Amino acid sequence: MTFNNAVQAANILLVEDDKDLSELIAMQLTFQGHKVTKTQCLKDADQQLAETAFDLVVLDRGLADGDGADLCQQWRQRGVTLPILILTARDGEMDKVAGLESGADDYMTKPFSVLEFQARVRTLLRRLKSEPSTSPPPTDNSPDLQFSGLTIYPELHKVEIDQQSVTLTANEFALLMLLANRPGRVFSKEEILNQVWETNFSGYHHTVCSTINRLRNKLTSPEYKYVHTVWGVGYKFEVAAL
């Protein structure tokens, strides 16, 4: 295995109670140059996240003290925005929907391909590392996007509705930027997958739908609606009065 220099070394929290699988995943991530902290239950994972700055969480669902998707949802409600990859044996369609609706950025089922797992980790980290760790002033290359009631600050990874800050995950922000840069333009699920998740795998369609739903729910304005579904085609950004 060789380390892909396109992504910087990251600090990753691995929450997995299968010791053999945990060792395998940790080994693969270490080969890529990452630092891995392993936990086996939700309580320890929650404590680790409170005490340490992580770049990514790889989270199992079926743990001894509960469902990882429930903890993922709690983290999102508390404003945790770091990427979360759910890795689980629950491969039913509704299981995937539930995992993604909880706020996860990605969902993989066991057994899985090591190469695909590494690729998905790289994709999540690449988006995270492309965002500024500080808050530099906006530049001419990335102007603020102004709409009725909504302002997007690309350089700051910041969104405001009626001057109130809205917390978005990396994927939610990337999706919003894709749509808002082309108001009125309809993007198919395949186009969104290619440009936001950097994949053409159709199995990600649930990921697109869930992320769209979360984004739409967060962009709540008493006067305007911004993200629209064009049935049978895809999604678009357009300011519409309520």
Image: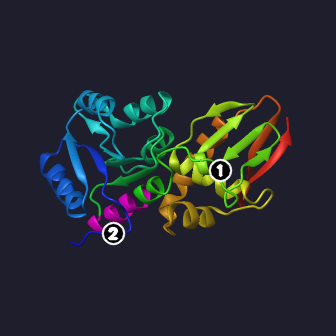
User: Which quadrant of the figure contains the N terminus?
Assistant: bottom left
Q: What span is in magenta? A: 113-124
Q: Secondary structure at mark 1?
A: loop
**Residue 182: image x %, image y %?**
75, 60
Magenta-colored stretch includes residue 204: no
The three-letter code of the residue at mark 2 reads: Asn
Farthest-out residue, bottom: 2
Is 25 or 132 nearer to us in this picture? 132
Q: Which residue is mark 2?
A: 5
Q: Residue at x 25, y 56 (%)?
A: 34
The residue nearer to you, when weighing 155 against 208, is 155
Q: Which residue is mark 1?
A: 138
Magenta-colored segment: predominant secondary structure: helix
Magenta-drawn stretch contains 114: yes
Quadrant of residue 118 in the image?
A: bottom left
Q: Looking at the image, which is closer to me, 153 or 214?
A: 153
**Residue 65 % position (x, y):** 25, 28
